Image (cartoon, grey):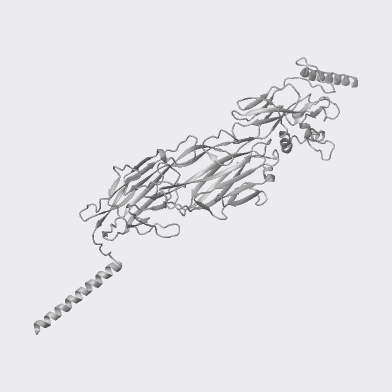
Amino acid sequence: MKHLKRIVALLLAAIMILAMGAGVFADGDTPADNNGSTPAYDHPLTVTGLKKDDTAKFYKIVEWVGEAEGNVAGWKAIDPYSTVLTPEVLKAVLLGDKTADPVVEPTGITSALAGALAKLAGEDGKDGTVAEGTATYDNEDSGMWMVLVTPADANTIYNPVFVSADYMKEVGGTVAIGGLYSGDAVAKSSTVDLSKTAETTEDAWDDNKPNTTAVGDEVTFTVTATIPAYGEVYEKPHFKVTDTLTGLELVTGSVTIVAPEGLKDHTDYELADNEDLDGFTLTLTHSYLKTVKAPTTLTITYKAIVTQEAVYAINEENNEVKIEYSHDPLNEDDYDVKKDTTQHYTFSLDAEGIAAGESTVIKGKKTSEVVKIGVDAAGNPITEIVETSMIGDPEVDKWESPLAGAVFGLFTDAACENPYLDKNGSAVTAETGADGRMNFAGLDAGTYYLKEISAPAGFVTNSQAHKVEIIAEVETVTVTEWWNGTEWVSEKPTEGTVKEVTYETEILKSYTVKIDDKEIAKYTFTNNTEPTSPEIQWEEAELIEHPYQLVNTQGLELPSTGGMGTTILYIVGGILVLGAAVLLIVRRRMNVI
């Protein structure tokens, strides 16, 4: 019976050897001997998880050499990768230590090894065929390959991928690399996202438009960015957030790192105010970034106060956030960039059309929503001076007898009992100039009430309250810009290393001024969605104005009711009555005599 068992065992062993040999000789090739020739057979390598238009190169880093001296169980690293994968390291990668107590399992290619190997990649890479998100290389050798994926999208970062084609598995003491790496793998990638949003927490008008603000408003900003899965692939990964404010003052101590959890102040990052940019910078340390093994969301919040003194009809302020980040383990000094912006707008009545330098067409011209004129008792103009709108149709939008010196107040209620207050808490007033215009600057979109407080000498005050509405409309546009290493430009440079960025932002599309429910002016802007800076385009604007004429009639100003005016009337009246009484008494006495 023992002899029968031995015969059966020998037969089974022979069958197994023949079966393994059949796989190796399937194409008529000869097996490798113990001195190192590699059997040839078809073993395609694949990497999935790629995106459209990505490319991939396959670099062979380990080959089968048999049981020759100086290798690890038949495997040996190829130059120049052998400087990293020394026999000791390769043993730890593929075998571990089965004799240790406890047993040390194989490490595989760690992220630190992956980064070191990637830096050695040269011209020996083989192009893979990429189709439908899969890169394929028709390999006929045994060994291990490193795959480096080049993204078509600059916002995507890939870590090196490792795949293998085994020699004879579990036969002759050889190592089955497939135990750690198979002939296919999924590319590990990170998509770097960046966004900046604004919320006006003290919007008196509750118009749900955080980009329309008044001077003195507090705005809460939220910056959200993706930290790539650097791991230890990068030796000194770089990730820096720079936030730039205009027309805003950063509230001291308001910058808060909301996420990720575990990010330790002064240990994992450096936060510094940037007075030159009226903002701040946040730089994550190399040591922290190397611990990030999966794409991680970083959230920053802070507060700022609108401080720009708005002397223009539209005060457009562009607030930018930019990140610089490592994106290539082969060249860590080459940072990619990404940006996003928010805009906030303040408005005015009868002010400069736009900030100096922003437009060559309407630069310095005044809007004309409201104008003060003076007439005589019959309603005729006092003078022959004619002023016309600088933006609207001069043949239609004109007025005679502009009146200077009329003082107006702005209120938040129809009864004009609650004056509109500036950032210092003072009631806002404006006096008409020689052209009859008044300037209420730094206003939010919303509803106000305009009332004359006092008329110039020789004119009667018009105390009628007028409802004033400023209605803003914004639109989302896609902007493409290029970073030339110094600044963002709206046209792609033809020389040097440039970085392209595309993002969405909200730009003012139009605003309308209504007085007493009548449309007085509407300013519509052309926001070009082609590559351009995110600025409103006044040059192609449709501008309509029909200035609302507020009339003062020439005549004696009657004392106001109440206050000193009433007191004076009572005093004068009392004196007259007393005088009449005295005169009456004197006459009676004369008659008696």
Relative to 283, 489 lies left or right: left
89, 534: nearer the viewer: 534
Instruction: Point out the residue furthest to the bottom here.
Output: 593
Q: Is residue 380 visible?
A: yes
Residue 297 at x, y percent in the picture: 60, 43
Relative to 251, 443 lies left or right: left
Residue 292 at x, y percent in the picture: 67, 42
129, 354: nearer the viewer: 354
Image position of 51 with respect to 549: above or below: above
Q: Residue at x 57, y 43 (%)?
A: 322
Relative to 95, 501 lies left or right: left
Which image quadrant is residue 433 in? bottom left
Image position of 531 with respect to 370: above or below: above
Q: Is residue 414 visible?
A: no
Q: Quadrant where the C terminus lies? A: bottom left
227, 250: nearer the viewer: 250
Q: Residue at x 54, y 40 (%)?
A: 488
Residue 358 at x, y percent in the picture: 45, 44
Number of labelled discs? Answer: 0
Q: Quadrant where the N terminus lies? A: top right
Residue 575 at x, y percent in the picture: 22, 74
186, 521: nearer the viewer: 521
Which image quadrant is residue 156 in? top right
Image position of 431 with respect to 99: above or below: below
Relative to 398, 206 lies left or right: right
